[in-house]
């Protein structure tokens, strides 16, 4: 009788252990599936949006960043900043004074967010991260944001089938041109910076844009693009990329580009 009692207890113990082990396996599978689904969702959500070249860990930017630091150490960006900040409204002056890591290089204003307000774009050197950043100010919301990081950007020129291509996101391209102008900027930063500037423009009327030779994203044209953010991508050629704001999706879209060379 005693032996049967012991055998019964052992049987019950083994049965409970097996069930516990089965539960642990099931939990493990559930956790693994959850992790995979989260990863997939994150990847899918980012597929259609641009990641700044500076945030792509696969890029070797050591020389690029060193060149920007050289311009900064030569007081190029500071000289431009000191001059340009005086032209801004007091609220923007206060913003940059409170965010001293940003040194203003280019700026423009207009109804960028299509709300009947005066909005702004500021291209800055970010001393903290040693990179160029593109900031936009929404006059209706009284809010500053950074392209590619705070506000998503789509590139509709990638599959436009018009033989147009560039390397790097716009923040990187602007920086690359500043580096290209290194000697001129160090010699006379204020004079040189006047040749290249961003703007909020009507590309159908602005003489800088040669629309018949440019590239439009699929489904886009110059019609109605009276408040486009246009950023030069060359200090030598009349090269530009233009973005429009999609109010329904709260995102910017690169819809036009032009590139000319010898």
Image (cartoon, rainbow, N blue to C red):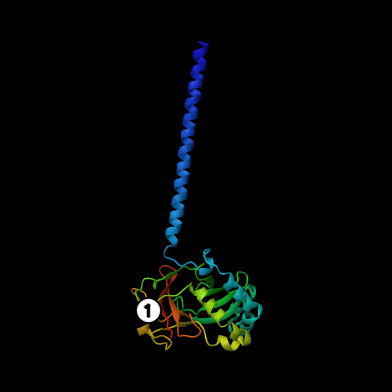
Residue 206 found in image quarter = bottom left
Helix, strand, or loop for circle 1? strand
Residue under the image location 47 percent in, 49 percent down = 35
Residue 207, percent from left and from top: 42, 89
Q: Describe residue 141's horizontal placement relative to residue 91 as left or right.
A: left
Q: Nearer the viewer, residue 175 or 247?
A: 175
How dense is the environment of label 1, judged by Cα within 10 Å: few (below 14), some, or many (20 and up)?
A: many
Q: Residue furthest top?
A: 1
Q: Describe residue 183's horizontal placement relative to residue 12 as left or right.
A: right
Q: Residue furthest front?
A: 262
Q: Is residue 156 above or below residue 15?
A: below
Q: Nearer the viewer, residue 124 or 54?
A: 54
Residue 147, percent from left and from top: 50, 71
Residue 114, percent from left and from top: 44, 77
Residue 176, percent from left and from top: 53, 77
Residue denoted by label 1 = 215
Number of on-image labels? 1
Residue under the image location 46 percent in, 57 percent down = 42
Q: Describe residue 66's horizontal placement relative to residue 202 as left or right.
A: right
Residue under the image location 57 percent in, 87 percent down = 192
Quadrant of the rendering where the C terminus is positioned: bottom left
Q: Does residue 139 show up? A: no
Q: Does residue 161 show up? A: yes
Q: Is residue 55 above or below residue 182?
A: above
């Amino acid at each position: 009788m005693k032996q049967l009692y012991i055998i019964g207890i052992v049987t019950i113990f083994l049965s409970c252990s097996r069930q516990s082990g089965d539960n642990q396996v099931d939990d493990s599978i559930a956790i693994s599936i959850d992790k995979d689904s989260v990863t997939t969702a994150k990847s899918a959500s980012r597929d259609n949006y641009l990641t700044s070249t500076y945030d792509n860990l696969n890029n070797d930017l050591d020389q690029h960043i060193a060149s920007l630091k050289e311009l900064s150490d030569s007081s190029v960006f500071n000289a431009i900043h000191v001059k340009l900040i005086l032209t801004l409204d007091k609220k923007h002056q206060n913003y940059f004074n409170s965010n001293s890591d940003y040194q203003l290089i280019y700026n423009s204003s207009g109804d960028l967010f299509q709300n009947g307000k005066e909005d702004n774009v500021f291209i800055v050197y970010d001393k903290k991260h040693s990179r160029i950043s593109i900031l936009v100010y929404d006059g209706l919301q009284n809010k500053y944001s950074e392209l590619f990081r705070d506000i998503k950007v789509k590139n509709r020129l990638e599959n436009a089938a018009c033989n147009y291509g560039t390397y790097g996101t716009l923040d990187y391209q602007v920086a690359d041109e500043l580096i290209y102008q290194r000697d001129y900027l160090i010699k006379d930063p204020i004079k040189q910076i006047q040749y290249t500037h961003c703007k909020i423009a009507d590309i159908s009327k602005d003489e800088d844009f040669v629309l018949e030779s440019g590239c439009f994203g699929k489904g886009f044209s110059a019609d109605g693009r009276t408040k486009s953010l246009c950023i030069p991508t060359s200090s030598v050629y009349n090269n530009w990329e233009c973005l429009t704001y999609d109010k329904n999706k709260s995102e910017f879209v690169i819809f036009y580009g032009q590139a000319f060379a010898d």
